[in-house]
Every structure is written in C-alpha cells, then in structure tokens.
Image (spheres, grey):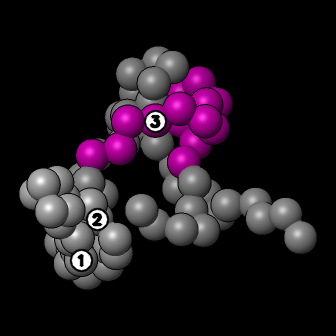
Amino acid sequence: MVTGTRYRCAACGNLTRFDVEARRHTRRFLHFSLAGEPTVEEEEVLEETIERVTCRWCGNSEQIETIPAVTAE
C-alpha cells in the first residue's frame, strides 16, 4: 500500500475506515513446507494502482481526499 498517505472522506469527515480496491503487480518468495504448504517469506510490490476508495461510514467514493499521513516523532 502507498506509505505516507491517508484518506479523508470530504462528505462525512471519516479518517479511519475505507475499502481500498487496488491492482498490484508483485514478486513473492514462497517457501513450501515438506507437506506442500506455502508461506510467503518476502513480497515486493513492483507496481500498484489504487482503483477505488470507498468510505465505510457513508459509502461515498466520489469525495475521498488524499492527505499526508501524520508521523509520530
């Protein structure tokens, strides 16, 4: 996911709950157990496109703003 970014719904003010639909192109390192169970040990996101962001509070997807994330120092 994009780091350093957060969303805000301009319709209701929500800052915390969103459905984010994204398309990703990734490279994964898989480790298979002797029983054949896969575990992802590393994943590199090569490309990511955010296609739609929807507010969980009001259902709005037309007035979603991207704002800088506040970091604690």
Helix or strand or loop: what does disc 2 sit on? strand
* Residue under the image location 76 percent in, 60 percent down: 70
**According to the image, label 1 marks what residue?**
29
Q: Which residue is mark 3?
A: 18
Say left or right for 19 vs 11. left
Please report whichever mark, 3 or 2, sits nearer to the chain's N-terminal start.
Answer: 3
Q: Quadrant of residue 40?
A: bottom left
Q: CA distance from mark 2 to mark 1?
A: 6 Å
Question: Which of the pair 9/70 is nearer the observer?
Answer: 70
**Percent x, y of residue 26:** 21, 73
Q: Which residue is pictured at 27% across the width and 60% down the height?
A: 39
Q: What residue appears at the point 54 percent right and 68 percent down from the top-left corner?
A: 3
Pair 3/2: label in front: 2
From the image, which quarter does the N terminus lie in? bottom left
In this orientation, which residue lies closer to the viewer: 39 or 23?
Answer: 39
Q: Nearer the viewer, residue 47 or 26?
A: 26
What amino acid type is highlighted by mark number 3?
Phe
Figure quadrant of residue 71: bottom right
